[in-house]
Image: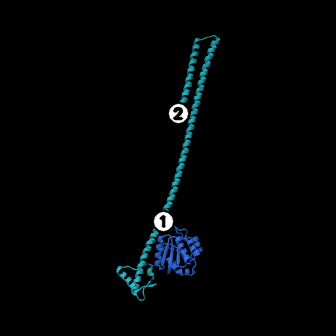
Amino acid sequence: MIDSILLVDDEDLFHLVFEDACSLLDMTLSLEALNSSDEAEKLFKQWFIEGPVEDRPQCVFVDLNIIGSSFDGIELIRKINYEYGNGVVIGIISSSDDSQEIEKAKEVGAQFWIIKSDEIEPRLEEFLKDYNNYVNKTQSFKVYK
Amino acid sequence: MIEITEHTRNVLLEVAKKKKIYVEGNFLKILKAPPGDVEFSNYLKVCKEKDSNARKKRLDVTKQVQAQNKELEQAAEQNETLMFDLKIALDQAEKAKEEAEKSKAEAEKLRDDAVEDLETLQKKSQFELVGRIVKIALIVILGVGVITTLLFAYTLISGQENPILESTWSNLFGILLTNSFSIVGTIMGVKYATGDKES
């Protein structure tokens, strides 16, 4: 089980879906959902300045196109990986399966790409199986279709 | 994992029994029944079952709403496309209408030009006809005048004066003169009348 997860997605309804799916899969103890990449960046910036804190997430799921944000999910991953070096397990969760975007995400250090669909649970279940390998950095980039 | 105290355990079981209120959410995941406490273990099982059922129900509903939202978005996109097509069709129709109006105006202009040409042609032929009539009339007037004058001059020169010829010449000359003025007056009148119609 993952202690804490952060979801960054502009769609409130998906927050509920994700929360329930995670709960049913016993995936996490704590889930925080944010609507914009700016808010997420602010948090990571704060953690970077203040040092390690207990409540920071272990795993981050970022939507690709976050409406109402200054930058997209790929840029957020780049910032978290290269500017605020937190070493969290981080990847994209999006309805898109655009290969160019997937490549871009890989380049900025995303570890996985989960494609949103009506049946998200099987993908999250598969992800959960691989989670420890992501933490150990032994799992190569994977797309959950 | 949290092992709860005897008091808390009893309170939780009591609340569940009397008020049907159960622990739910992620807090359940960190609660642990003391070893050998079957009653509390069963309570936690019921709590988890209830929580799981509630979440499944909510997940189904949110998924349905998501699907409906998706359909609505697609319908909105289709509507937008239709509106766009409609706008294009409307623009084309307006363009066609403008072109038709332009063609109509051109056709009307051509018709007006043709009518004008026809009128000019008619006037020209009328004018030529009038000119010819005037010419012939003048020739006749002059011819008759010259002939009678020559005849009258011949009688005067040859000494064969004839009172009938004299009176005929003077009458004829008077009549011809009057008629010629009458013809000129008629022509002027016709010309004036035609000019009025034009204006």
Q: Which residue is mark 2?
A: B197
Q: Amino acid at mark 1?
A: Glu
Labels 1 and 2 within one chain: yes
Relative height, residue B173 to residue B117 (above, below): above
Residue A120 makes an appearance in the image: no
How many marks overall?
Answer: 2
Relative height, residue B194 to residue A119 (above, below): above
Name the image quarter holding residue A106.
Answer: bottom right
Q: Which residue is mark 1?
A: B73
- Where is residue B63? Give x, y as percent: 45, 72
Query: Residue A26 has which mark?
Result: none
- Where is residue B50? Give x, y as percent: 40, 79
Viewer-proximal residue among A56 and B121: A56
Q: Are marks 1 and 2 in contact (CB under 8 Å)?
A: no
Could you tell me which residue is drawn at 44 percent across and 73 percent down? B60
Name the outermost residue toward the front: A50
In this rendering, would A99 be left or right of B13?
right
Q: Disc 2 sits on a residue from what chain?
A: B
The answer for how far apart the CA atoms under marks 1 and 2 are is 71 Å
Name the image quarter holding residue B132.
Answer: top right
Task: Tell me the shade of chain B.
Answer: cyan
